[in-house]
Amino acid sequence: MLQYILRRLLWMIPTLLGISIVVFGLIHLAPGDPAAVKFSGMASGESQVGANEEDMIRKFRERHLLDQPLWKQYVHYLGPFNLGPKGHSWFGGSGDDPWNGILVGDLGNEFRRPTVEIAGEVVQRLKVTVPLALISIVVSYLLALPIGIYSSVRRGSVLDVTSAVLLFLLYAVPTFWAGLMLQLLFGKGMWDLLPVLGLHDKDADDLGRVAYWIDLGKHLILPVVCYSYASLAYLSRQMRVGMVETMSQDYIRTARAKGLSEKVVVLKHALRNSVIPILTLLAAILPILVGGSIIIESVFDIPGMGKYAYEGLLLREYNVIMAVTLISALMTIVGILLSDITYALVDPRIRYD
Amino acid sequence: MSKAAFEAGASSVDLTIEDPLLEVRDLKKYFPIRKGVFARHVGDVKAVDGISFRVRRNETLSLVGESGCGKTTAGRTLLRLLAPTGGSALYRPIPNGPQVDLFELSNAKMRGFRSDLQIIFQDPFASLNPRMPVSMIIGEALRVHGLARGAELEDRVSQLLERVGLRAEARNRFPHEFSGGQRQRIGIARALALNPRFIVCDEAVSALDVSIQAQIINLLKDLQEEFNLSFLFIAHDLSVVKYLSDRIAVMYLGRIVETGTTQDIFERAAHPYTQALLSAVPRPDPTLAKDRIVLQGDVPSPMNPPSGCHFRTRCPLAEDRCAETYPDYVRLSATHSAACHLIQPET
C-alpha cells in the first residue's frame, strides 16, 4: 500500500510537468501580453504610443524575458536557473540572482504589483477558497445522501419523481445565472435578507467575536448554495442509482431472508455497498468546485483563488495563471489519489500492491 | 380409489401426507407488465400460476423444471421475499398444532417466522454481502432475533462454521477470500444459524463444480438428519434431485404438471414433459438405446401462454383437444398425479 502511494506520488511529477507545458503554451497564445495591458493605461487617449512608453515596454519585456522564444521562457519559469539579465552566469547573466522558477519554489511575482509574491498571495486566497469548497462539499453530501436513499427506497413515489425533476432542473441551471438571481432576490433590491457581496460587512472589524462569525456565516450562505446545488443534484442522482442497484443484489435478499428489519437492510447492508462510488466522486467534484470558484467568487466578490485567477486572466498575469492552474491540478491529482485510498479503506476486497 | 380421494384428485397434493409442516395452496405470483408514460397495466407475466403442494416434516420435496418455469419465483414467494399475488402458505411448526398462513402475516410478524423458514441461494458469489466478515454474515441474524450475543454469539458462529466443514478461523475473513464451494458452505451456515425447520434450497448446488456438488449434497443430507429439517429443493438437474429427494414436483410454465414420490417420477413418469426431462439425464451405460426425447423449440412466453395445455406446443403427442382446455390432474395413485389429457386414471 505504501509502495503504491509512493508510486502514485512519483507519477504526479510528469503529470504536472505536462500540464504546465500545455497551460504555458496556451496562455502565450492568447492575444495581448502583460506589457501591453500594464502600459495601456498610460497610452490611452493618444493615438500613438510615445517614445518614452515604448522604451518602458521594451525594458519591461526584457526584464521578464517576454522578448525571448517561448521555450526559453518556459525553462526560465520552470527553473532552477534564472535565464534573465541578472541570472546565472552560465547563461550569460550577471549572477546577481542565479535561481528562479517553480523548481526552487518560486512562483514569481505579479507584473502589475512587482513587490507581491504570488506564492504568498495564493496561500492567502486558498484560505478563503478551500474552506468554502469544503463547506459546500459537506453540505451537498449531507443533503444528497438522504435524498438519494429516500428516492431509491420509495422508488416511483410522488416525492421521488418530483425530486428527480427538480434536481435535473437544478443541474441544468448555470451557476453565474443562479448567483445573480440569488443576489437579486435576497439582496437590497427585493427581500433584503442576506448580504450579497464579499465575506464581511465593512465594519466587521469592530464587531464582537460572535457577531463577527454570524456576519461571516450570513455572507457565506448564498455562495455555498451556489457552490453546492449542482453537485447536490449530481450526487443525489448517483446515490439513488447506486442504491437501486445495490438493493437488487442477491445479498440484500439474503439480508431480508435473515429477517432483518427494512431499516437495517437499507442503512447497513445497502448503504455500505453503495456509498463507495459516491465517496470517490469527491475526486470528480473537487476540481469542479475549484473551477466553479472562478465564477462564484467573481459574482459574489469573494477574494479567493477563483477571483485571483479571473483577474489574472484579464490582466495577462502569466505567473498568476500558471500558479493557479498548477495548484488546482495538484489538488485534483491529490484528490483522486485520496479517493483511491478511501476505496481501499472501505472495501475489503480492494488491496493495492 | 375412494370417492373422496377421487374428488380431491383434481389437485397435485400428495394425499398420503397428513399434518404437513407446510401446505401451499394455489400459490400465484404475477409480475405486472407496464407500458408507456403512465405505466399502464397491459398484462401479467404469470411466473407461478396456482401451484399446490405439501411438505412433510423431515422430508425433501424437489421442484424441478427448465429455467424460466417459475420454480425459483415459487420458492421466493413462499418465503415472502416476493409479494405473493394469491394463494396461501399454511405453516404448522408444531405437529398437529395451530397453523398460520404466512401470506396473511404482517411484515413485522413475518420477520418473527424468518428464523423458522430459511433459504440457501443459488449464487454463492452474489448472495453474501462483500463488505461483511463471515462472522457478521452468519451472526447478524442471531443478534437481530435476540438468540445470542457476545461470547455466546461468537461460539455459535464458530460451531456453525465447523459444522459445515470450515475452520472457525474463517470467521474473520471476507466472502471474496473463499472458493465457490466454501462460500456455499457459508451460505448454509448462515441459513442454519437460526435453527430453522424448513429451508428452501434455491438451486443450491447448480453454481458449483460436480465434485463440490456431491460434497454439498451430502452435507445437506447430514444436516437434514441432524436438525430434522425439511427442504424444498429447487433444481433443474434431475440426477442431483434423484439422490436427495423424497418427492418431486415437475413444473412447466408456472404450473406443476406432475408430482409423485421419487420412485413414481423416475420409474413411472406419466407426463410427456417429465418423460422428456428424464430422457435428458445422462446414463452411464453406453449399451442402452439412445431414446432421447428432444423437445423442439423454446419454452413459450409466460406472458402469453398457449391455449389449453401449456406444453402442447412442444409435446410430441399433442392432439386437438390439448389446445382447448387445460388438463385436470389425473390421479395415478395416492402419491402420484399428473396433468395431461392423454393419461387415463387407474380404475
Image: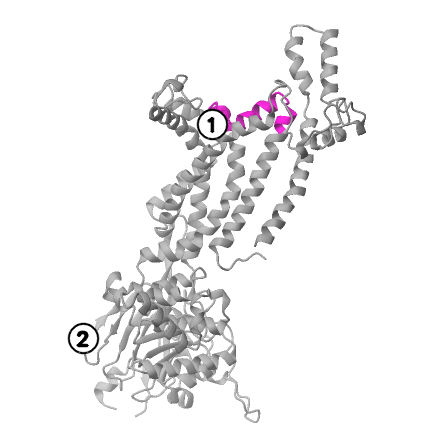
Chain label for disc 1: A
- Give the vertical position of A283 relative to B95 (above or below): above
Residue type, numbered disc 2: Pro
In screen coordinates, is A289 left or right of B14?
Answer: right
SS type, badge 2: loop
Question: Which residues are the magenta region?
Answer: A295-321
Report the residue that reaches farthest toward the bottom.
Answer: B287
Location of residue B133 by image quarter: bottom left
Q: Is B152 contained in the magenta span?
A: no
Task: Work out whether residue B228 or residue A83 is closer to the camera in this orientation and state it.
Answer: A83
Q: Is A304 contained in the magenta span?
A: yes
SS type, badge 1: helix
The image's mark for residue B98 is 2
Residue at 42% from the left image edge and 88% from the top image edge = B266
Instruction: Report the quarter where the C terminus of chain A lies.
Output: bottom right
In screen coordinates, is A125 left or right of B231?
Answer: right
- Give the vertical position of B119 relative to A251 (above or below): below
Whether discs 1 and 2 lie on one chain: the answer is no
The image's mark for residue A177 is 1
